[in-house]
Structure formats: structure tokens, C-alpha cells
Image (tube, rainbow, N blue to C red):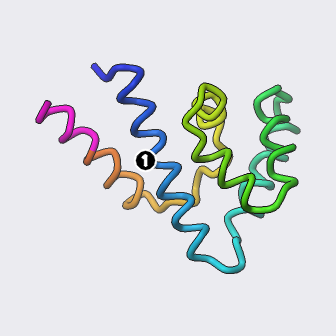
Amino acid sequence: MKTHREIEERSLALARAIVAKIDDDPQRRALQHARAVCARWQAAAPAAAVAEWLGILQQDWRPIRAALLDESERGQRLRQSNPFCGVLTPQERWAIYRRFSHEQIAA
């Protein structure tokens, strides 16, 4: 069974991959995707975490990027309701899952 720390490390690795993908896209299309996801979530089931992301997503890329990579408790909490789902392909996401699965077996 994975510990909370292992889950958070995997979550941060996923966030880093998302950030890298957005950094490589001059149009930052994933930001529009995340804004649409957040709006849909908030319309379906309003929640404080989604409202917080809506506020973050109104900013420029730099503070959004910082929120995704924040290693504090706030960053950990934000990643639990990350609206960037769908930015990574299933193959990209599973490569990270496999990497963490293998690291757990090797430990």
C-alpha cells in the first residue's frame, strides 16, 4: 500500500509533467482546458477547492505554475483537486504511475 508521502510524490511528478507540457506550448492551450474543467465542476457541484482553482486560473501562467508546483501543504491540497486532468495523455500519465510503482517495488 502506498503511503501518503508516496502518493504526494507521484502527484507532484504528474504536476511537473503538466507544467513541462504547458511550458512547451506557447499558446498555453491547457490553461483554457483547465478553466473549462473548473467552470464545469463548479456548475455541477460547487466546492471551495474548485472556487480556489477558479481564482488561481484567472491569473497569468507564472502564478498558476507556482501553484501546481507548490510543495507546501497548500500545494498538496490544491493538487488533490487539480483541474488539469486530460492535459497528459494516458500514456504520459501511466509512465509516471509505472515509474512510481517500480520505485515502490525496488524500495
For badge 1, the amino acid type reads: Ala
Secondary structure mostly seen in magenta is: helix
Q: Residue at x 62, y 77 (%)?
A: 25
Q: Quadrant of the N terminus?
A: top left
Q: Residue furthest left?
A: 106
Indicate the position of residue 45 as horizontal and vertical percent values.
82, 29
The answer to if 64 sits in the magenta stretch is no
The answer to if 104 sits in the magenta stretch is yes
Q: Residue furthest bottom?
A: 26
Residue 107 vertical placement versus 84 (above, below): above
Q: Decide: few, some or many residues near mark 1? Use Cα within 10 Å; few <14, some 14-19, many ≥20.
A: some
Determine whether, in the image, residue 88 is placed left or right of residue 80: left
Q: Residue at x 84, y 47 (%)?
A: 39
Q: Quadrant of the C terminus?
A: top left
Numbered disc 1: secondary structure: helix
Indicate the position of residue 55 as horizontal and vertical percent values.
87, 43
User: What's the magenta region?
Assistant: 100-107
Residue 43 vertical placement versus 2 (above, below): below
Residue 19 vertical placement versus 80 (above, below): below
Q: Residue at x 75, y 53 (%)?
A: 63
Indicate the position of residue 72 as horizontal and vertical percent values.
59, 30
Residue 10 vertical placement versus 18 (above, below): above
Which residue matches tag 1?
13
